[in-house]
Image: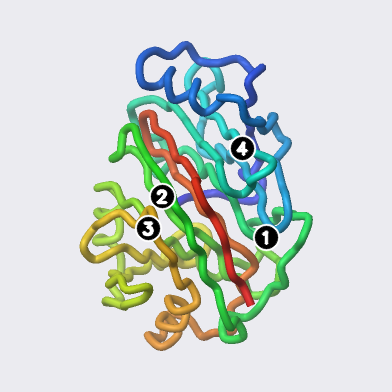
Amino acid sequence: MRKRDAAGWLLLFLCATAPILATTGASAQALDNCVGSKDFIREKQPFAKGRYLSYLASWNKGELLEGRDYWQCLAFNRGTYPDGQTIAWSWPNRPPPSRGVYNFLAVNFGNYYDTIVPQPIPPKPVSDIKTLKQKFDLGISGDLDGFDVIQDFFLTRDPGKFDHKLFELEIFLHTPSYSHGYARQVSQVGKITASGVQWNVSVDKHAANGQDILVVPANGADLLSAEIDTKAILDQLVAAGVLTGTEYFNGLGLGVEVRQGSGRLDVHKLSTVYE
């Protein structure tokens, strides 16, 4: 449900030495816990290891200033990465003036959106993927109706080229009320079952980055400790006629989109199988 262009993907990172917004109570504790004794990502310097890259992308902040109007932090453990990451944030208690969300704070696998990892993965047409599964153990806290947790990726016309994005696919792992509302307002595809979960599928055919496919648990439950068979979801979207199977998969992101307020995401465990 985001509106962004390539220029909007300037990676903004907050480290311990950067100016910090004065916080109290839960927000201050979340920042302290995020910092802990781990490593930090510095501004405009994403951390990458193996096939993963972590970053904080604030592309819809308008006139808000980091340190004055909001803060955010991504801390990690070099020895266990991508396991053991913490993302914490505090944004105004109101949505962005331009609607949508402020950012995407995430760890990506492969080439999420013109991102470079030390061990690149090969882009593949959806129909040529044999296995695409992601297993994770996550924890969330804070203003739970102020952010989502999603597995998100773009399907492109050409391998590794994001100037012709055909679809964005959002698989919701934590679904706030406004995301439920958005999914109900756009074109309905129906229900699919994958990873032992029944999902509602809908499509925003007028999104900025190609059509936006929304895959939401039908029962509205969180899926914070799970293994998602993303290939099975893609195959059912092909069977439903939403995809053709010729679209290219390049990589994906797992993280939070913040609409308002404060919160925290802990990535305790994360692994991906792609063949």
Say which quarter of the image contains residue 92.
top left
Q: In which quarter of the image is the C terminus?
A: bottom right
Local packing at callout 1 (Cα closer than 10 Å; few below 14, some 14-19, many 20+) is: many
Disc 3 and disc 2 in contact, CB within 8 angstroms: yes
3D distance between C-alphas at marks 1 and 3: 20 Å
On screen, 25 above or below 274? above
Q: In this view, does 268 lie to the left or right of 197?
A: right
Of the numbered discs 1 and 4, the one sitting upstream in the chain is: 4
Q: Specify the amino acid type for callout 2.
A: Val
Amino acid at circle 4:
Phe
Report the Cα–Cα distance between label 3 and label 2.
Answer: 6 Å
Q: Do the residues labelled 1 and 3 touch (CB within 8 Å)?
A: no
Query: Which residue carries the number 4 mark?
Result: 76
Q: Looking at numbered disc 1 in the image, what kind of residue is underneath it?
A: Asn
Marks 1 & 4, CB-CB < 8 Å contact: no
- Mark 2, other Cα within 10 Å: few <14 / some 14–19 / many ≥20: many
Quadrant of the image occupied by residue 121: bottom right
Q: What element carries label 2?
A: strand
Disc 1/disc 4 C-alpha distance (Å): 20 Å
- Spatial CA distance of label 2 from label 4 is 18 Å
Which residue is tagged 2? Answer: 149
The residue identified by callout 1 is 111
Q: Which residue is found at the position 50% from the left and 40% from the top?
A: 103
Q: Residue 31, position in %: x, y?
A: 49, 23
Which residue is identified by label 3?
Answer: 172
Q: Which of marks 4 and 3 is nearer the N terminus?
A: 4
How far is the residue under mark 1 from the one under mark 2? Answer: 19 Å
